[in-house]
Amino acid sequence: MKPAVIVFPASNCDRDVAVALEQATGAKPAMVWHGDADLPDTDFIVLPGGFSYGDYLRCGAMASKSPIMRAVMEKAKAGTPVLGICNGFQILCETGLLPGALLRNANLHFVCRTVTLRVENSQSIFTSGFETGQFVDFPVAHHDGNYFADDATLDRLEGDGRVALRYVDNPNGSARNIAGVLNDAGNVFGLMPHPERVISPLLGGLDGAAFFKGVVDAAA
Amino acid sequence: MKAKIIITLKNGVLDPQGKAIEGALKGLGFDGVTDVRQGKEIELSLAETDEAAARAKAEEMCRKLLANPVMENYVIEITP
């Protein structure tokens, strides 16, 4: 596998994701600057967490218009797996690759703690390291993780099994406790929690290591 | 021309910042406040000299970047 991590101004989880990918694949991923127009040869793209463009205007709004995003969108539409974590999820929603939007947390707090998630659909390449119904613990760290979409969209997402992860104890007011959603084709996934932060017992857990190993095995 | 763009959250979209402002106003004794919704205003100076052209350009900017139709509405006011 040849993963690529997109680096935006004020991405701050790009190196954590690179470590997680190297652990899962045995090779260093390509780090791609947002201002580049072209992607290297890649078969898995990650948009990392952070605060691209200082969250100005709306979280992810400016980053979604970065030069590299045109290439990312082309690859996504051609079927290449694309993963967006936290700010990456916000960027994917702003591009329209994923439905909905991430609003300010309903309780107005910046939430920074480990949350328990229920795996609702393990049939996706992104959740194949888990079993449906399994509970996993990932940290969250965000101010704008309150997933919103209209009721018709939410019904469709649930009906199609595209809500892959759900909060057990909703930390941010997300509609229907949604923590992670898939696109229609199943090759684009966005989630607010950070699997890359739990890839070693030293970091407090291994659920994230299972997440990345699952993606690598499924996409290989 | 100048364009003033007022962006508001759609009806039904939770506005926690508006709720916090409402709570603070009530704390100051403004008991008659029944709801607060907050938004943002963006002012643009445009090279266009024609009102229709300026409006069309501002409209395109809103669609492409300034507003997110999933959660926001916008109103454009054009002035010389």
Image: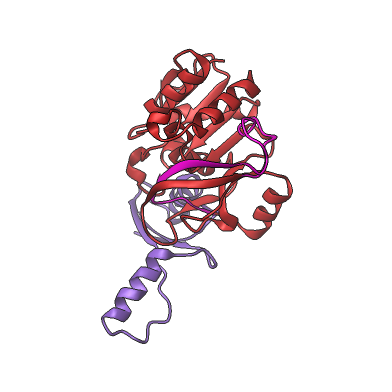
Q: Which residue sits furthest left?
A: B28
Q: Which residue sits furthest front?
A: A201
Principal secondary structure, stretch drawn in magenta: loop
Chain represented in purple:
B
Would you say residue A59 is visible in this rendering? no
Q: Quadrant of the C terminus of chain A?
A: top right
Q: Is residue A2 above or below residue B79?
A: above
Q: Is residue A112 above or below residue A207?
A: below
Quadrant of the rendered image containing residue A83: top right
Quadrant of the rendered image containing residue A81: top right
* Residue B22 position within the rendered picture, expressed as x and y whole percent measured from the top left: 36, 75
> Is A98 left or right of A105, judged from the image as shown?
right
Query: Who's the residue at 34% across and 71% down the image?
Result: B21
Q: Quadrant of the N terminus of chain A?
A: top right
* Residue A141 position within the rendered picture, expressed as x and y whole percent measured from the top left: 39, 45
Query: Who's the residue at 42% across and 81% down the image?
Result: B34
Chain represented in red:
A
Residues shaded magenta: A119-147
Out of A220 and B15, give the one closest to the viewer.
Answer: A220
Q: Is residue A39 above or below residue B19?
A: above
